[in-house]
Amino acid sequence: MIDARAVVAPQAELAPDVEVGPFAVIGPEVRIGARTFVGPHTVITGTTTIGADNRIFQFASIGDAPQDLKYKGEPTRLEIGDRNVFRESCTVNRGTAQGGGVTRIGDDNLLMTGAHVAHDCQVGSRVVMANCAALGGHVHLGDWVIMGGYAGVHQFCKVGAHAFLGNNAAVTRDVPPFVMAVGQPARPHSINSEGLKRRGFSEEQIRVLRDAYRTLYRRELPLAEALAELTEVAKRHPVVQSLVDFIGGATRSLIR
């Protein structure tokens, strides 16, 4: 299952059924789970753990040193879950000591050609990053986030679950769950209603979230007042609670 032209360090731990293509390079501190495919010319290095059933296409760079001038070779990690797809020329960097030491990617994600995940990012599950979408360092992406082509997220920003970032969106502040953001800099556009329908949210839940969006963005309320109203709504409609929690835990200002 390992092409004779690949370079695999003897210390690397690969499940017996891992497939490695020609001219791939796998470093000594790499562990790769069952049924994972590593394409030709892929480089996987650093202290990197990759779960089962992943597919890594040609010329991807996974687990290399962070692009951070403060990094001085400290031991840091990259952890990747199961059933992810990394298309051609994706780059994923491991963490920094200052950022907690680890970059994490969950399960069932699709990173299209040229997508980039920087150091110390925390990426959830079922995320889609379209071609050349990029995350700065320390970014948090919730589950089910979709990033359009060439969208970018500034370092330390958070994007809540089920959010949608339009193509070329430049995210410089936190994007709440369920929100569609567009533009440079990214601005709130609407609730991601089509995505929520596809994921099984009921018409009632989507209506409630639309009303919550109006409270947050259309009524021109101060953020504290909008949050207080949404907190009361969440008591009757639990689907709003994750929005309330996100706003309360935001470390940067919200897109407004």
Image (cartoon, rainbow, N blue to C red):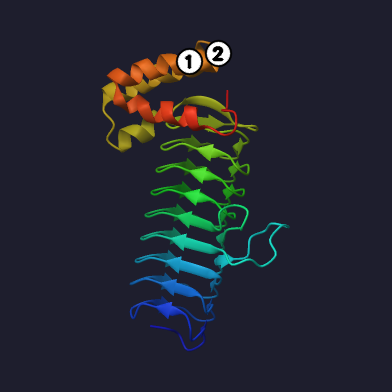
Q: Split into 4 quadrants, where in the image is the N terminus?
A: bottom left
Q: Residue at x 57, y 58 (%)?
A: 95
Q: Residue at x 29, y 21 (%)?
A: 237
Identify which residue, 199 or 33, lies in the foreground.
Answer: 33
Identify which residue, 173 or 168, lies in the foreground.
Answer: 173
Q: Residue at x 37, y 32 (%)?
A: 194
Residue furthest bottom as drawn = 4
Amino acid type, label 2: Pro
**Position above or below: 79 against 225:** below
Amino acid type, label 1: Ala
Q: Split into 4 quadrants, where in the image is the C terminus?
A: top right
Which residue is tagged 1?
Answer: 226
Mark 2 residue element:
loop
User: Can you tell which mark lies on residue 222?
Assistant: 2
**In the rendered structure, are the residues bearing label 1 and label 2 in contact, judged by CB atoms less than 8 Å apart?**
yes
Q: Is residue 58 visible?
A: no
- Residue 128 is left or right of residue 82, and the answer is right
Residue 97 drawn at (x, y percent): 61, 58
- Residue 235 is left or right of residue 10, and the answer is left
Mark 1 residue element:
helix
Instruction: Using a 10 Å C-alpha cutoff, classify the residue at mark 2 as few (fewer than 14 neighbours), some (14 to 19) or many (20 or more).
Output: few
